[in-house]
Amino acid sequence: MTTHDLPLGRHVDYPREYDASLLFPIARSLGRAHIGLSDDALPFTGFDRWNAYELSWLDARGKPRVATATVTVPAGSPHLIESKSLKLYLNSFNSTRFDGEDIVRATIAADLSAAAGAPVEVAFGLPSIGNDDGAESIDELDVAIDDYGPPNAGHLRADPGAIVEETLTSALLKSNCPVTGQPDWARVIVAYRGPRLDRAALLRYLISFRDHAEFHEQCVERIHSDLQTHAQPQWLSVQARYTRRGGLDINPWRGSHGLAPPPAGRDERQ
């Protein structure tokens, strides 16, 4: 299946009943091939954490129920799940009766696991809002910017004579949907130990995604790959918290093997 087959950007009838076939998986290998990554030897671990704000179904007596949900898709799964298809799939629960929320949760987990090709975790509820990552913002650096794409790893610089351990963040990441061209916005959190990154160079690099068309998950993998190649840190963690679209936000994380995942959380913009 290619992106031309997706419902994104086309009129799609509102689903009238539960329908798992609405889910559209996309092979991760398609995006990874463009940045020189192989599914057989990924240089990172990670996940894609989705926050779903608009989930509803009917109970056994026909009374509507509502919930929020956190969905965690492993980065090692062969497929990512296209976001509008996930929205349509979740909307297909709206007019369908289920005998309890446990059945709803288990159904979603089973369907998403089948689409992703690996076990997907689903929990009702959302992480709390708050920036507890201890990151230092680089957004107020006094720099001139004239490069808005394609992503330019040539901007990246690191000082091999200064080994540091720090967490940096920027809320200025913008990329575009590869199908519709609609903007996607995110805050990026980069944590690492290794040669000190030139902060102005990092900011220029992140802003060079501004006119780039790529899925959220692939952008984060590109950032991780470029930083690993050009800075050669001892360990590296890259997380992006994308703002909500269609009742969903996506929070991909990629980190060096052996790293503990960052705690779940949400930004105010989400």
Image: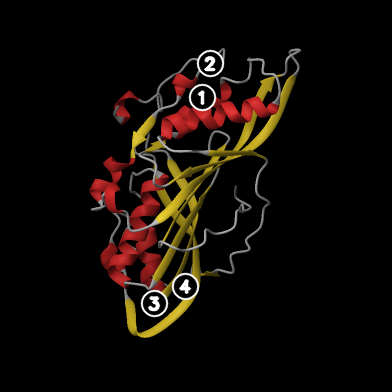
Residue position for label 4: 141
256 or 22: which is nearer to us?
256
Residue neighbourhood size for the residue with mark 2, other residues' Cα within 10 Å, grouped as few (<14), some (14–19), many (≥20): some
Q: Amino acid at mark 3?
A: Gly
Label 3 – label 2 distance at C-alpha: 50 Å
Residue position for label 1: 88
The image shows residue 111 at horizontal and vertical percentages of 50, 27
Label 4 – label 2 distance at C-alpha: 47 Å
Residue under the image location 29 percent in, 47 percent down: 39
Quadrant housing residue 10: top left
Is there CB contact under 8 Å for labels 1 and 4?
no
144 or 218: which is nearer to us?
218
* Upstream in sequence: badge 3 or badge 4: 4
Q: Disc 3 or disc 4, which is closer to the eye?
A: 3
What SS does tag 3 mark?
strand
Residue neighbourhood size for the residue with mark 1, other residues' Cα within 10 Å, grouped as few (<14), some (14–19), many (≥20): many
The image shows residue 264 at horizontal and vertical percentages of 60, 53
Residue neighbourhood size for the residue with mark 3, other residues' Cα within 10 Å, grouped as few (<14), some (14–19), many (≥20): many
Horizontal side, residue 165 vs residue 230: left or right: right
Q: Amino acid at mark 4?
A: Leu
Residue under the image location 28 percent in, 66 percent down: 229
Label 1 – label 4 distance at C-alpha: 41 Å
Residue position for label 3: 194
Label 3 – label 4 distance at C-alpha: 22 Å
* Upstream in sequence: badge 1 or badge 4: 1
Q: Amino acid at mark 1?
A: Leu
Labelled disc at residue 15: 2
